[in-house]
Amino acid sequence: MSPPNFVSQRVGNKPTSNNTFNTSRFSLCNRNISVDGITLLSEVPVNVALSPFSSLPHSSDTDSIPPHILKSVASKSKNGAFLGLSVKQAQDRILNPIGKLLNRKFLSLFRFKTWWSTMWVGSSGSDLQMETQLILLQLPELNSFAVLIPLIEGNFRSAIHPGASHGDVVLCVESGSTKVRGQKFSSCAYLHVGDNPYELMRDAFAAVRVYLGTFRLLEEKTVPKIVDKFGWCSWDAFYLTVEPVGLWHGVKSFAENGLPPRFLIIDDGWQSINMDHEPALQDSKDLTTLGSQMLCRLYRLKENEKFAKYKSGTMLRPNAPKFDQEKHDAMFKEMVALAEKKRKIKEEGGDVLALPSPKTIEYLNDDEDDGQERGGLMALVSDLKEKYQTLDDVYVWHALCGAWGGVRPGTIAGLEAKVTSAKLAAGLQNTMNDLAVDMIIEGGLGLVNPNQAADLYEAMHSYLADVGISGVKVDVIHTLEYVSEDHGGRVQLAKAYYDGLNKSLQKNFAGSGLIASMEQCNDFFFLATKQVSMGRVGDDFWFQDPNGDPMGAFWLQGVHMIHCSYNSLWQGQFIQPDWDMFQSDHICAEFHAGSRAICGGPVYVSDKVGHHNFDLLRKLVLPDGTILRCQHYALPTRDCLFENPLFDAKTLLKIWNLNKFAGVVGVFNCQGAGWYPEEHRCRAYPQCYKSISGVISADDVEWEQKDSTAVYRNTEQFAVYLHKSDNLTVVKSNEQINITLQPSSFELFTISPVHRLNERAKFAPIGLENMFNSGGAIEFLEYVSKGGLYNVKIKVKGTGKFLAYSSEKPREIILNGEDVEFDRSSNGILGFEVPWIGGGLSTVYISIY
């Protein structure tokens, strides 16, 4: 039986010349949607229309669009077309087939939870998952690719669903409110074609940006300063028990071991929140089990009592409070055990009054009569920066609606909040079960009147900025779609909140100090990213499976990498991809570290205090707390795009990125787990958790994605350094290197173009051997010849052994103005030590006859 609202009428192969356009490579003829005569969708219903990109009016806000984007979009307008549809009766949620997709490989990105999306591959519309945000189609007949993107149109947003009939692709067009109905749509989805999958994604979203005018592309925005730095997040060290003393000792632990964090994220647990049954103006005392905070609402914009008690200079004194992570964890476990005991007694109808009352873990009090007033967050941030002067930024966490449960009505002056019943959108019914969703549905959301959304953010953020906070991590973003019934639908409600958020970001946090999280749905990207320029592209780092799978400590890590790399294909058009934190002492820490080194975003960990692997971190972080960041963001290589690196038992995940003068390919064995449609969850596929073999070559690097590296496509030879194997070899551009990886292991390939100096001499710099992203250390490279002597000038960031390939032995190497000893093997591997010079660049001259 067809689902409700399906429009199933189909017609035969009569030509529909009025729907065939000469101004687009796409056509709708004989009920087939084709590109250059190649069918993409067949048996298209009569109520579906196709319009060339140039035929529909675009956003009037063209003055804000950079001219080069407008010019590029105009020059490629024939490559795009809009899908529209009409139904007989106006509806708030339309499920409409748009044709059959059969026997064509695709990559899709779908929401497996309200907040998170991931990849899925297949070859039929029946293979699609609910809430698909994008489909990339392989067109081998044209040596090209096409993308289908559901859009925002008016008060409606679209997503792609699988149909009831074999191969059907269904477009879900919904408002999120039974009071907001529509009947006719001209642009609820967009098609674009191109011969390079990465350029296709950029061109398609540039076209959508020009058409909608509701967001800006990543290239138009400034990213947060933290992107080039190392940081620490409090979450896995403390969870909701975070407080000033533990935070201080966490920063101290890194700094004293030579890796000072340049940014700190104070995660969930610092806010003034409570539950509806608790006193309205007091902190909750029952934040023990994870999930309890999801029933809490914000009652005050300032920090909670744990932080408010901090007095200026407290941690600068010789007798400052100590911190013991093990004792802290033991107290936390006792609290959780007590909460669990109470829960069971209540379920059995027993009396819990005899049990101890909940308490808060804190190490500060107001009992000391020292004459000092409370300093709170302002004093804590000031003291941290006084003691640890390399700490540039302190961010704090908050939910989009204030707290997990929103704002408590009647508690914050000037804000009108109302507890609104939350209802899961129909398209999310078959997504993965989620405690957060269950709790929000149970408790509802304390929603501030959308007309005051800007006031909420201005009040909250201006206070934080005044006390020294330089940015926010905004989480729990997609609760809005649960409560849009009486607010004009999900698009209108989202606009009010996102507009307020963007204005506050611009005013209070230098226009960029924000990390978006739990945001991986298309209405966020289309409506919230005019100013927001960084966001999470994976789900949370889980150090083990919360459901108890003994393999989860391993397979979860590969799943996380797949989320991050494939999501970046579309999310990276809007925001700088953030691959999230990890723990440096985790059993798979090196696996994570290898991916973070080349992801192109910030590197930060969530280590418990004193629980660190500094040897590993030093492969990622320099002594001044900066990192060797790639120039692009990491993406899957072409040969991975339509494969399943999670449980096809044959495919390695390969991700490419670019440094200034070299490429890098990371190869990861992520096999052993993934989405399980029958149970709507991720699970282990133990039969796939085994060694996997594959190949890499210099051609895996997409050199053209940066103008500065495009010239390397024509290079004849490359020097390739395998970091884990500590092996350097010279290969031709298309020569393949075989590799076999054990489960949950990886290899990093630095790929450097070989430059011919003369008939005999060839040279290629690799970078710092001791850093995962070796080539990221090279900030400047120049080849100069004079009188038969060739000089290679290199500027190096960092410290350690510098590697290069040199077919001839150098006459001399001058480092920072002085001769330096070097070694060179018979196969041309050149090495010398580069000292640390306080964060400056070392200058190297290598002279070769």
Image: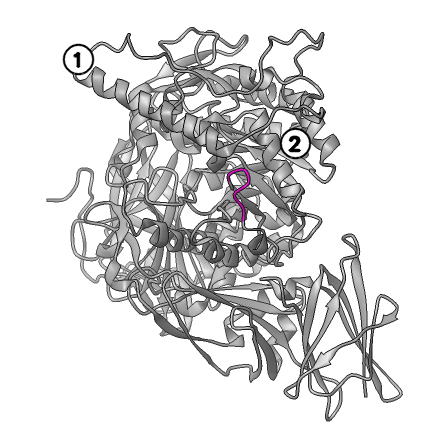
Marked residue nearer the N-terminal end (2 or 1): 1
Residue with the mark numbered 2: 470
The Cα atoms of the two marked residues, 2 and 1, are separated by 48 Å
x, y percentage for residue 107?
A: 35, 59
* Residue range highlighted in magenta: 608-612
Residue 250, numbered label: none
Confirm whether the magenta stretch covers residue 611.
Answer: yes
Residue with the mark numbered 1: 349
Q: Residue at x 40, y 58 (%)?
A: 147
| Residue type marked 1 | Gly
Q: Residue at x 73, y 32 (%)?
A: 387
| Residue type marked 2 | Ser
Secondary element type, mark 2: loop
Q: Which residue is at the front of the view, 741 or 317? A: 317
Q: Quadrant of residue 836?
A: bottom right
Residue 613 position (above or below residue 321):
below
Note whether residue 483 is visible: no
Which residue is outermost to the front? 319
x, y percentage for residue 228?
A: 65, 49
